[in-house]
Amino acid sequence: MLKVDNNRITITKGDTLSLEIELTEADGSAYEYVEGDTIRFAISEAYEGDINYHLIYESSFAADSLSLVMPAEETKKLRYKTYNYDIEITRADGTVDTVISSQISVTGEVA
């Protein structure tokens, strides 16, 4: 099961996480990809101090949208709990923009 509600994600452990995210600039204009821009999807238990990332997933992308796919073997590594996550763009010029920051809940299957 995958559910996204106001950027909060709920996923069943061991399922594939697949998201399509449209990207816009802060002023509402279309995001324009520049060669060398990268995206980072990170999941952690806390936002404070030295964050211990449980999973960092990086990929390159193009155009004004991002297809983020985390395979089932990666979601199996997560425990049953609620984590914090964020998605950041690191632009080719070194600028870092946080696109989304919210929570992801990992649930179990019915036995």
Image (cartoon, rainbow, N blue to C red):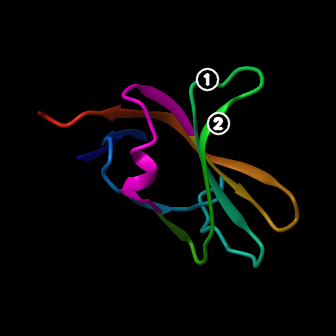
The question of residue 111 being in magenta is answered with no
Label 2 is placed on what type of residue? Answer: Tyr
Tag 1, which secondary structure? loop
Q: Position of residue 11 (x, y in %)?
A: 32, 42
Magenta segment: 69-85
Q: Position of residue 4 (x, y in %)?
A: 33, 44
Q: Nearer the viewer, mark 2 or mark 1?
A: 2
Tag 2, which secondary structure? strand
Placement of the C terminus among the 4 image quadrants:
top left
Mark 1 packing: few (<14 Cα in 10 Å), some, or many (20+)? few
> In the image, is 22 to the left or to the right of 80?
right
Q: Give the residue displayed 59% in from the left and 58% down from the top.
A: 28
Does residue 82 lie above or below 5 as drawn? above
Which of the numbered marks, if any, corresponds to residue 46? 1
Q: Position of residue 31 (x, y in %)?
A: 63, 67
Label 1 is placed on what type of residue? Answer: Ala
Which of the numbered marks, if any, corresponds to residue 53? 2
